[in-house]
Image: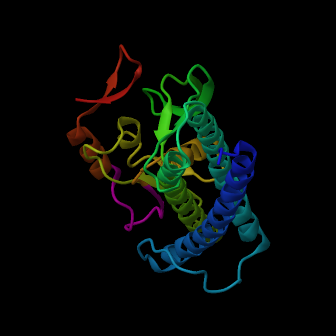
Amino acid sequence: MPFNLTTFKKTLKSAFSKLEKDQSEALAVEISANFIAGQTAAEKHKSIKSAEPEDDGLTDEEKAEIATLTALYLGYISEFNSRAQAQILARVQELVKAGSSQDEIQSYVDSVFLGEESIVIDNVGKERKEIYVDENLKLSEVTRTVEKPFYSSVLAYASLIGTIASHTAYEKGKELYNRAQGYNRWVFVGPADERARPHHIVLIGERFTWGTEQSSYAEKILQEPRCRHRAVPFYNDGRDVKKEVWDKLKKESGVFWNEPLNKWDIK
C-alpha cells in the first residue's frame, strides 16, 4: 500500500497539537509552582523547589506575571515545534521519493519524538538581541548576527525552556516579594568557576535597582541558558556579603577584559 502523504500531514499536525497542549499545561504548572516557591524562599530563605501550587492566593499582578511568563516561553516552544514539524515533513517527503518503506519512515518519525533525532534551527545570517557587558560593567542590549545553526531534539529543547522558565519564575516570585518588603535593590551572586561565563562572573557582587534598565538587562543575563547565578536582596546591613569578598572571588577566577576582542574573558 503506497504511503499517503496527505494523511501523514494531518496525523503529524495532530500529534504536534497534542504535544504542545501537554507542554503548555506542564509549563503553566511549573511556572506557577516556581513563582510561589520563589516567594516562599524569599520569605523563609529556603532553597529552590518545585511543587504543585498550594493555593490561589495570588494578587492580580502576580497572576498577570505568571500568565506573561507562560505565554513567552510557550511561544518559544511553539516556534521550535513548528520548525520540527516542517523538518519532519520535508524529510518524510525525501524518504517517500527515495522509495523508503513505511516502517523506515515510521522509525524516523519515532526517533524525532523520542529525542534521538536533532532538529536544526538555521537562523544563520539573521539578527538577534543579546545583553553586552562593557569594560565598565555597564549593560546594554546589542544586535548580533547569528553565525551557527542551533541543534536540539524535541525533548531536550522543551526541557531547556522548562528549566529557564522555572528559574525565571522563581526569581520573579522572589523579586515581587522582596520589593513588597521594601527591598528595592539586589545583588548579582553565584559561582566564579570554570563553568561560569566571563560576562556573568564580572557581575558578581554588583548591585542593581529593580525596575531600572540596568536591572532589566542584568535579569535577562540571569535567564540565559544554564545560568547558575541568582539575585539576592541588598539589605544594606550585616546580612550582606561584603563587596570585597565578591571582588576577591572575581579576581581569583582569572576573568579579564580582552581588549582586542572587546569582551570579558578568562585566563
Q: Nearer the viewer, residue 142 or 51?
A: 51
Q: Residue drawn 46% across and 33% down?
A: 137
Of 267 and 115, nearer the camera is: 115
Residue 182 in sight here: no
Work out whether residue 72 can be spotted: yes
Q: Is residue 230 left or right of residue 267?
A: right
Q: How is the image coloured?
A: rainbow
Q: Which residues are magenta?
A: 230-243
> Which of these two is toward me, 184 or 97?
97
Q: Is residue 266 above or below residue 43?
A: above
166 or 245, nearer to the observer: 166
Q: Residue at x 35, y 36 (%)?
A: 198
For the point 58% across and 32% down, which residue is it? Answer: 94
Give the left or right position of residue 131, taking residue 248 as reference: right
* Residue 238 colored in magenta in the image: yes
Residue 57, percent from left and from top: 71, 83
Is residue 248 one of those drawn in magenta?
no
Residue at 61% of width from left, 46% of height from top? 216
The quarter in which the C terminus is drawn is top left
* Callout count: 0
In the rendering, at what x and y percent does residue 213 appear? 64, 41
Q: Main secondary structure of the magenta part?
A: loop
